[in-house]
Image: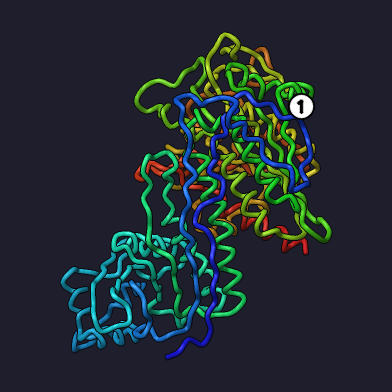
């Protein structure tokens, strides 16, 4: 059967920002607007070498082309035909033949080999199961069965499908792959779009490997992925492009978090933000404030954390405005930007402290900047977005903040620092005040804030705190679309009692009990009551221990949320 229609969407599988050799660990930026494409990123590659002389490699990655097709799967020509099956799809009749139409058609062409192999390998269609066979009799060289579980109803199984398919392609050095659902006839038009998006996202993120800090980079042969049976047309083309745009933001976020602290200093993080504004200068402006400018804004809480480091702080403010039309809603995304956290004088000690992983303490800022990169490509209308990061390091020196010190935030509130390792909330305090001063209606802050949240929700779920039910509904709808897991926790006001200080307006930490809640209550003190606000504690899902790599968590949800706000405004 000939193809009725074909959609071809190509996008690169990694970001175009490998940091090069941005080595200016003491770089200061003045506040300046960026509108001209001719203004280039300040790299200072020859000015100063990094600690350890480490330079991330500029790795060129292959382009993966996605196409949506309507073809007979038995006639598709390529390396691997991957069939996604539910447990129900594997039902056999009295003659041990597949009842599913697609499986039956493929199996008949293979003389029963598919049914035989699935039985021998005890393949039941459960999530995570897969089997790939080298075959003759079809247009493809191999056929694979990928399990979807009982009845997939969320994006997660389809993202896992995309990941499993590219894993099979890597192991067999396949250059062309087709993916088909054994049962797609019952899907609505919207479900087909969402499924194609999830498969494409999983494939792109699955094939990505961050090899910038390895002496030898692995290469993949995969060049094309055809998605069969989910329709064709401009709407699907748009959805596949959207998957590419969001995935590029997620990959950028992963690269930021993966980068070691001797490379990704606060100054280099600011450079990355400036590059986003320069690349998408039609919709972005950038303002980077140095320590002196932050002092003029009375950001004593943020500057107190930054005081011990030889690498000066950089306060990052990107502003997105749509390329045309009115602005109907103003939003702010605030990300914690500790490029390294030693704990300060309350230094992190013991085997469970994970000090060697504290490069990921800027995971909130990576989520914010990854979202900015994605939105620079998507260019939604009707919405203005402010991206704010108070970037710095929490180190130890004679100039550093001590336990017992009192710092004053930019809204005038005083804080007794009873633990220097509760520094993220101190930087976020001034960032939230700054965000409110931009005239925004809604703020989401993201932070790797507390170990208590990881204890409560584990490594895969982020904790959500907000006094606004409306904002909670918006964000959870966005997370349902993205497949990222969130769980709402209470803002229990009675717990604030533990945060009272004898010499200042508040302490920066309370007792061990309810630590994530108390931290959220602390942040609430720096948000205007007229502004809808949400805090997302992403200390768990920022990092994948099994893969020893960043996840890019939060970006897909934030992009969905911003777009929904833009569409509501229109």
Q: Give the farthest residue toward the bottom.
A: 1
Is 156 in front, or is 12? 12
Which residue sits at x=74%, y=25%? 294
User: In percent of the image, x 43 and y 32: which residue is there?
Assistant: 357
Task: Measuring from the top left, give residue 241's x and y in whole percent.
Answer: 58, 65
Per the image, the residue denoted by label 1 is 411
In the displayed image of the protein, which residue is found farthest to the right?
A: 326
Q: Residues within 10 Å of mark 1 (few under 14, many from 20)?
A: some
**Taking 489 as reference, is 522 above or below it?**
above
Q: As rendered, which of 66 and 132 lies closer to the eye?
A: 66
Q: Residue at x 29, y 86 (%)?
A: 104
Q: Is residue 89 left or right of residue 245?
A: left
Residue at the front extreme of this rendering = 46
* Residue in the foreground of this view, choosing between 41 and 129: 41
Question: Residue 124 location, x and y as percent?
Answer: 26, 70
Vertical position of residue 362 compared to residue 37: above or below = above
* Place of residue 480 in the rendered image (x, y in percent of width and height, measured from the top left): 54, 59
For the image, the number of numbered tags is: 1
Residue at the farthest left position: 120
Drawn side of residue 547 relative to residue 205, left or right: left
Q: Quadrant of the N terminus?
A: bottom left
Q: Is residue 457 above or below residue 293?
A: below
Task: Tell me which corner region of the image, top left, top right, bottom left or bottom right, holds residue 437.
Answer: top right
Looking at the image, residue 200 lies above or below residue 333:
below
- Is 493 displayed left or right of 211 in the figure? right
Can residue 323 be seen in this snapshot? yes
Quadrant where the image shows the C terminus? bottom right
Picture coordinates of residue 43, whole percent (x, y): 62, 35
Can residue 498 be spotted in the picture?
no
Quarter of the image for residue 291 reads top right
Helix, strand, or loop for circle 1? loop
């Amino acid at each position: 059967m000939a193809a009725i229609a074909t959609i071809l969407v190509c996008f690169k599988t990694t970001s175009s920002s490998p940091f090069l050799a941005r080595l200016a660990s003491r770089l200061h930026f003045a506040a300046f607007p960026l509108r001209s494409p001719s203004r280039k990123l300040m790299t200072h590659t020859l000015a100063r070498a990094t600690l350890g002389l480490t330079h991330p490699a500029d790795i060129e990655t292959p382009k993966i082309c996605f196409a949506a097709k309507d073809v007979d799967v038995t006639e598709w020509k390529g390396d691997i035909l991957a069939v996604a099956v539910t447990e129900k799809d594997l039902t056999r009749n009295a003659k041990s033949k597949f009842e599913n139409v697609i499986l039956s058609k493929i199996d008949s062409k293979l003389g029963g080999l598919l049914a035989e192999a699935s039985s021998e390998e005890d393949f039941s269609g459960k999530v995570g199961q897969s089997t790939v066979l080298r075959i003759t009799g079809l247009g493809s060289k191999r056929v694979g069965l990928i399990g979807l579980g009982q009845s997939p109803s969320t994006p997660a199984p389809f993202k896992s499908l995309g990941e499993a398919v590219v894993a099979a392609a890597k192991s067999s050095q396949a250059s062309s792959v087709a993916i088909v659902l054994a049962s797609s006839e019952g899907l609505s038009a919207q479900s087909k779009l969402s499924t194609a998006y999830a498969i494409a996202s999983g494939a792109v993120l699955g094939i990505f490997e961050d090899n910038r800090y390895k002496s030898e980079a692995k290469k993949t042969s995969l060049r094309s992925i055809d998605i069969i049976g989910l329709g064709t047309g401009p709407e699907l083309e748009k959805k596949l492009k959207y998957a590419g745009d969001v995935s590029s933001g997620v990959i950028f976020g992963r690269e930021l978090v993966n980068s070691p602290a001797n490379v990704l200093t606060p100054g280099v993080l600011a450079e990355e933000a400036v590059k986003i504004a320069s690349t998408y200068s039609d919709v972005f402006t950038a303002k980077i404030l140095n320590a002196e400018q932050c002092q003029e804004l009375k950001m004593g809480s943020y500057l107190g954390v930054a005081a011990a480091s030889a690498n000066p702080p950089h306060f990052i403010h990107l502003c997105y405005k749509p390329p045309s039309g009115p602005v109907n809603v103003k939003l702010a995304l605030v990300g914690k930007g500790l490029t390294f956290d030693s704990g300060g004088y309350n230094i992190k000690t013991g085997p469970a402290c994970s000090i060697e992983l504290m490069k990921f303490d800027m995971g909130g800022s990576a989520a914010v900047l990854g979202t900015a990169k994605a939105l620079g490509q998507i260019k939604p209308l009707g919405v203005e977005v402010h991206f704010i990061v108070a970037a710095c390091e929490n180190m130890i020196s004679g100039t550093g903040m001590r336990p017992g010190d009192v710092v004053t935030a930019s809204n005038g509130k005083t804080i007794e620092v009873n633990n220097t390792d509760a520094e993220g909330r101190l930087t976020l305090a001034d960032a939230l005040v700054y965000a409110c001063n931009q005239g925004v209606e809604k703020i989401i802050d993201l932070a790797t804030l507390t170990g208590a949240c990881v204890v409560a929700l584990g490594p895969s779920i982020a904790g959500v705190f907000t006094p606004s039910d409306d904002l909670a509904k918006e964000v959870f709808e966005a997370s349902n679309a993205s497949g990222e897991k969130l769980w709402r926790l209470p803002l229990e006001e009675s717990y604030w009692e533990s945060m009272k200080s004898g010499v200042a307006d508040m302490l920066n930490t309370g007792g061990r009990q309810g630590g994530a809640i108390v931290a959220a209550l602390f942040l609430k003190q720096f948000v205007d009551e007229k502004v809808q606000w949400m805090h997302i504690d992403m200390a768990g899902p920022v990092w994948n221990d099994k893969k020893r790599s960043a996840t890019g968590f939060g970006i897909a949800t934030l992009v969905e949320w911003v777009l929904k706000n833009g569409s509501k405004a229109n």
